[in-house]
Image (tube, rainbow, N blue to C red):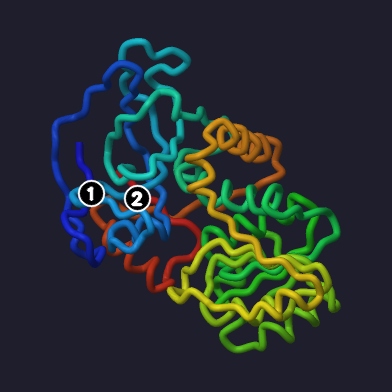
Amino acid sequence: MRRVVCTEWGEPENLVIEELPDPVPGPGQVVVEVAAAGVNFVDALFVAGTYQIKVPPPFTPGSEMAGTVAEVGDGVTGVAPGDRVLSSLGLGAYASHVVVAADSLTPLPDQLDTPTAAALAQSYCTVWLAMTSRITVTPGKTVLVLGAGGGIGLAAIDVARALGARVIAAASTPEKLADATAMGATATIAYESEDLKTRARELADGQLDVVIDPVGGAHTEAALRALGVGGRLAVIGFAAGDIPSLRTNLVLLNNRSVVGVDWGAWAMRNPAEQAALLGEVLNAVSAGRLHPATPSQRPLAEAGAVLRDLLERRLRGKTVLVP
């Protein structure tokens, strides 16, 4: 097997590739031959040692993957060699083979190709939790999505559209805004050159109901100011690198709310609820209500370069590493 290894916290370019014997499953375990591993912002934070959970090196990054069952251990039922599956690992997905507990695997519906499945869980589960649990998006509401050309942003557009909302997409480049429009956004804002607050209010006809913010940085306060009466800001992440400080009077005005969405921690604490949530997402994909975009593919050996591109916001949509 081949795997990417972080030997010390630091820059993603320091990642190395190791060759090891293929793993063998223990009781209750399964070996999955990885077809694709999703690339996420949290992976870069683990490698840098700046995530709130610090994992001592050496370790293999990668929090989600999809592939084919290669071998099952003693006592495993319900899954067999040849089955297509996905799994959220936390760590270890940047590899050609992984060993996981059998009960952590989810079978893939026929309508979902394996590379797309590898990039699905973190983005779609995050925004599904945000829009159906942390806040409630209902038909007719207007949703502003920041970072709309990234993986979380495109998933947020897709889920909001499926829930009957109208979506305004804000992103940094014309190419990312075009991707957002293709996903279903009905209006766009180039927030590096346009006034985000003013344009969002204009496009929402004065009543912006929800902001989905995976970006942070300078745009968060402008988006908060754009919200109408009872508006809600969902804080999902800080891809821009800067964690904004918000004035609480802006929350008080118009009875606004600011809500945190930490899907990863929630999923670890609530495994049964997470399994149900992922089932809802996959059912929506099977029914044609959700339309996850096909990710771009890069070789496993380029993991460091891909994480650098992610950190510097050069990636569009989702990217997977292919062993």
Name the residue carrying label 1: 4
Q: Confirm or deny contact between disc 1 and disc 2 (CB under 8 A).
A: yes
Residue 134 visible? The answer is yes
User: Residue 181 falls in which quadrant of the image?
Assistant: bottom right
Which of 56/145 is in front? 56
Q: CA distance from mark 1 to mark 2?
A: 11 Å
90 w.r.t. 246: above or below: above
Q: Residue at coordinates 67% horizontally, 83% vertically from top-left?
A: 196
Q: Is residue 140 above or below residue 223?
A: above
Name the amino acid, label 1.
Answer: Val
* For residue 306, side relative to residue 291 (left or right): left
Residue 58 image label: none
Question: Could you classify mark 1 by the number of other residues whose Cα lies within 10 Å: few (under 14), some (14-19), or many (20 or more)?
Answer: many
Quadrant, the C terminus: top left
Return the residue at label 2: 321
Residue at image position (56%, 30%) is 272
**Location of residue 276 (image quadrant):** top right
Q: Residue at x 42, y 60 (%)?
A: 41
Residue 92: horizontal and vertical position, in percent? 30, 42
From this view, report whether residue 254 is shown above or below residue 130.
below
Task: Please say whether residue 173 is visible from this viewpoint.
Answer: no
List x then y, in percent, for residue 104: 44, 29
